[in-house]
Image (spheres, rainbow, N blue to C red):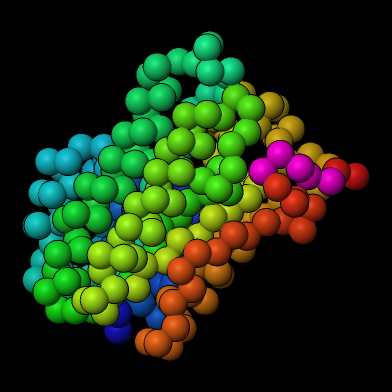
Amino acid sequence: MKTVFITGATSGIGDACARLLSPEYRLILCGRRVERLNLLKDELSNVITLNFDVRNREDVNRAISDLPNEWSDIDILINNAGNAHGMAPFHEGDVDDWDAMIDINVKGLLYVSKAIIPAMVKKKSGHIINIGSIAGKEVYPKGAVYSASKHAVDAINNGMRLDLVEFGIKVSQVNPGMVETEFSQVRFKGDTEKAKSMYKGYEALTAKDIAELVEFIISRPAHVNLSDTIIFPSAQAAVTYIKKR
């Protein structure tokens, strides 16, 4: 049974991936909210949990290096942890929001990847799934820094694939459009009504939709790599173009 390491597993896409993959894979689930990690551990089989913040390089390295021997051979890494904070025009942006997005979406992904990939290189086997965004392909008003962080994920994904192909490691990216999760509540700092308004008038994707795509990607034969995918709800045609009822 292969071992899958999932960051940001306590909500949204990470939680959905954990629930969908649990029957067929051993899971290392990572997140900042201990109570949610404990619930997942109680509900799912073949699971261990790690409580750390991907922004803290020392905590990342410590948690991964302290994995029990029987869990240290990681086959699949799903870099899912990410966030969006605020939605203001650039000149009114909050620098703390910018720091949070760069630290989690970019540096967090780098820290976790650097801690896990060398072992994959050594055994010449592995698969990395980076959860990006359509914002990593396009830019939209009031989203410059979030888009910049996801453009960085796109570049890192492509660079990883070039550097790791000689070691038999697959690198794939999933770029969702509008997905209805806690994402908008975080972006709008708990303003539930504003968050809900983002999904009115059309049927958005669900976290399970993304998890099903991830499951499909990692279940392909050894000679197949879906290196870069975009997944939209059928009502969406571009990052800012959604046909509403």
Is 6 in front, or is 239?
A: 239
Is 197 in front, or is 232?
A: 232
**Compared to 240, does 79 lie above or below?**
below
Give residue 223's quadrant in the image: bottom left
Q: Is residue 19 magenta?
A: no
| Secondary structure that dominates the magenta span | loop
Q: Is residue 166 left or right of residue 44?
A: left
Q: Quadrant of the N terminus?
A: bottom left
Counting from the top left corner in percent of width and height, residue 38 is at: 33, 53
**Compared to 236, does 194 lie above or below?**
above
Counting from the top left corner in percent of width and height, residue 146 is at: 49, 34
Farthest residue, direction right: 245
Residue name at image x 14 percent, y 64 percent: 118
Residue name at image x 26 percent, y 69 percent: 164
- Count of labels in the image: 0
Residue name at image x 38 percent, y 57 percent: 157
Counting from the top left corner in percent of width and height, residue 109 is at: 31, 48
Q: Quadrant of the C terminus?
A: top right
Residue name at image x 35 percent, y 25 percent: 99
Q: Is residue 183 visible in this depiction of the protein?
A: yes
**Compared to 124, does 119 lie above or below?**
above
Q: Is residue 51 visible in this depiction of the protein?
A: no
Counting from the top left corner in percent of width and height, residue 171 is at: 36, 67
Give residue 25's quadrant in the image: bottom left
Please report the bounds of the magenta region as a residue range: 239-243
